[in-house]
Amino acid sequence: MKKIIRWVGSNKQEACIFFIILLVSGSLRFYKIDQYMFFLGDEGRDALIVKEMLTERHIPLIGPPTSIGDMYNGPLYYYMMSVPMAIFWLNPVAAAGMVALVGTLTVGLIYYLAREWFGKSAAVISSVLYSLSPVNIIYSHSSWNPNPAPFFALLAIIGFYHIRKYQDFRWLLLSGLAVAFAIQMHYLSLILLPIAGALWIYELAKAKINKKNLKKFIVYTILAVLLFAILMSPPVIFDFRHGFMNFHAFSKFFFGDRETTVNLNIFNALGRVYPIYTHNLIERYISGENIFTKGFLSIAILLPVFFAVGRIFKKKILEWPTLTLGVWLIGGLLGLSLYKQTIYDHYLGFLNPAPFLLIGSLSKILAGKYFKWGMIILVIIVSAINIARNPLFTPPNNQLKKTQEISKNIIAESGNKPFNFALIAEHNYDAAYQYYLDLYGYKPKKVPFEITDQLFVICEDKICKPVGHPKYEIAAFGWSKIDWEKNTNGVKLFKLSHFQL
């Protein structure tokens, strides 16, 4: 803290710029967060699990399910959620606020790394562009396990950087912790393991110069691995208790149906690197989906890496920061190229800070007068495009408020009597409604064990025919008839009762 105060005192102008960037970034992520946050089935499921943690002391050993079979993430995100939801008792907005705070801190970390490696101009460029990225803003104002991945990926890189800067191998503990958290946010962050391994091997080679340093390096490596193992142990314990369900799902994913999941042949996967880089990473995250800036940025971001490699051969100079970003970027792209299914935005969470740091580094490499003005113009254009596409310009979805109001409506119509509940929706499931019905003290009875005299059905689809619908909660209720239906908050609400001959 004293170092920070001294730095602010001696760098007042830069500190002011830094805090303005953080303020803008935080405002973009916290603005009307309760209205813009997503609160559908996944968010409701997570809130229900955290509610069990806080009220029933039930600590989960696995986290949210993946989209692949019976594979589950680790539970660290649930543990993170439990802190704000304990402070702001069972309020899902608190979990979204935690993600917004982490997203804002991610901007701060990017400023810090760019400032350390490439100077003030690079710090401003990298952090401003990252804070304005529409995709980053969207993923920073909702509670979802992949969203904090960029923060932990940056912490892992910072750990290795501090080893080099301070020659203090205790920073390996930070990297071990951060990689474990990143992997449990989303399993594609496993790609960080070989990237971290490459950085570790380089540090090992440097540590051999001094036997005393080598001993410390090995000791803290062992401790970092142990910390990583401890953090990754809950899903392992779960597997031991449940017939290695996750392990079998992993095995099937990597070594089972390879035609539809992964291609472990790196040469066959190379063809996917280009579209993942230009479209999924540059176009979606940086260029605001503008095809002209996408092409220019795709080339410009790689220039620092090419220059750094060239200096190794020409001058025998190794620029660790740029080469680390190159290993991070190229290693991440190669890892993602092995995945044969659709690449969604959140899959790149562990990777997306790297190109922003590289684009900032151009301000140091292209230091000439004309290049400097070129960078300023580029940053202004890209910023303007991203500002124009800011998701806050669209009306808020108000999903949380709608869920609350619909849940209260069902309770009012129930006459304070027990009821069953079902949701008909093509792209959603009932956990969000279940959460608030439960929170308000009217947890729906489960069929077929507790069949009541009334069944409330919410329909979010265009065509709604609840009677005879194959949805289990409706079918298990038995023969039914519609007592009434009405439109509420953009959905249809039905009350069904038992059909009597």
Image (cartoon, rainbow, N blue to C red):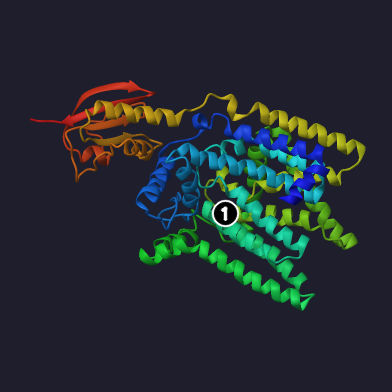
Give percent across and percent down for residue 483: 20, 24
Give percent across and percent down for residue 184: 52, 55
Give percent across and percent down for residue 148: 57, 47
Identify the secondary structure beneath mark 1.
Answer: helix
The residue pinned by badge 1 equals: 182
- Rendered image quadrant of residue 42: top left
Instruction: Identify whether 123 is placed above or below 201.
Output: above
- Rendered image quadrant of residue 446: top left
Residue ID at (63%, 38%): 284
User: 174 left or right of 239?
Assistant: right
User: 308 left or right of 439?
Assistant: right
Would residue 103 be visible to someone looking at this image? Answer: yes
Instruction: Identify whether 327 is placed above or below 371.
Output: below
Residue ID at (26%, 41%): 472
User: 67 left or right of 203?
Assistant: left
Residue ID at (67%, 47%): 353
Would residue 296 be visible to someone looking at this image? Answer: no
Amino acid, disc 1: Ala
